[in-house]
Image (cartoon, rainbow, N blue to C red):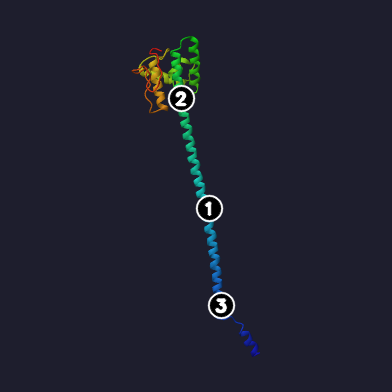
Amino acid sequence: MIYLMLQLGSDKPKWTDVVQAWGMLSASILTLATLITTICITIIDRRRAQVELSEERRRADNKLREELQRTAAEQLRIFYLQTLLKIVDSYVEISSAADIDEKKRATHKIRAYLHAMPDEIASLIRFEYEPFISESSRRKAQVFANKLGRALQRPVPTDWILTELNEDLSQFLPQSGNLTASNDDGQMPGQHHNLPAGA
């Protein structure tokens, strides 16, 4: 009996074993905590990277959109400028037409060009050569005549038309020279058109 009790007493863990077991358990818990922390940090970093990537894409899309808008606006400005100069060319052709057929062809061209422009552009030429014009065009033409204290009627004086063309052109080419009826050599500054003084 005593032997059995001694034998059972010998199975009790030693304090070194207990310390070692607690050490292993603590290490396991620490390893698990480190692993969980690493996973959490990885998830947070991944989400942050996704947010940053989305923000970067958004900024890139906005930049591209703005660039496309600037390009479209520039192309439209150039188109309006070129069309306005074609209107000037057609006005020259009408003014210098040798016969009625040539004048009709030039009038058809100027009407086609006018339809490609905003209503507020070249309102006096519209009033002169189009049978019907929009209310905004007529209003602008009337304001121009009112400033001069004159009645709006056909034929519209050439200097009126060229003055308005100068103002319209400045919208599309701010640094351009002024268009006037004529300068010292009889040509409009910046252009090579001779407009009859009384056209």
In the figure, 122 relative to 69: above or below?
Answer: above
Sequence-wise, the earlier of marks 3 and 2 is 3
What separation in Å lies between label 3 and label 2 (alpha carbons)? 94 Å
Q: Which residue is mark 1?
A: 47
- Counting residues from the start of the chain, the first of labels 3 and 1 encountered is 3
Report x, y in % for residue 72. 49, 32
Mark 3 burial class by Cα count in 10 Å: few <14, some 14-19, many 20+:
few
Furthest residue toward bottom: 2
Which secondary structure, mark 3? helix
17 displayed left or right of 147:
right
Quarter of the view holding residue 156: top left
Residue type at the position of mark 1? Arg
Q: Residue at x 63, y 84 (%)?
A: 8
Q: Is residue 162 visible?
A: yes
Kindly identify the residue that appears in the image at 50 percent across and 14 percent down: 105
Q: Which mark is residue 18?
A: 3
Instruction: Judge depth for marks 2 and 1 and give the one in front.
Output: 2
Marks 1 and 3: in contact by CB < 8 Å?
A: no
Whether residue 53 is situated above or below residue 69 in the rendered picture:
below
Apparent side of residue 93 relative to residue 150 in the rendered image (left or right): right
Question: Three-letter amino acid code at disc 2?
Answer: Gln
Q: Position of residue 185 (x, y in %)?
A: 35, 17
Instruction: Tell me the quadrant of the picture where the C terminus can be found.
Output: top left
The residue sitting at 41% across, 24% down in the picture is: 169
* Residue 60 versus residue 91 in the image, above or below: below
Query: Front-most of 170 and 94?
Result: 94
The residue beneath circle 2 is 82
Q: Is 108 left, or right, of 12 in this rendering? A: left
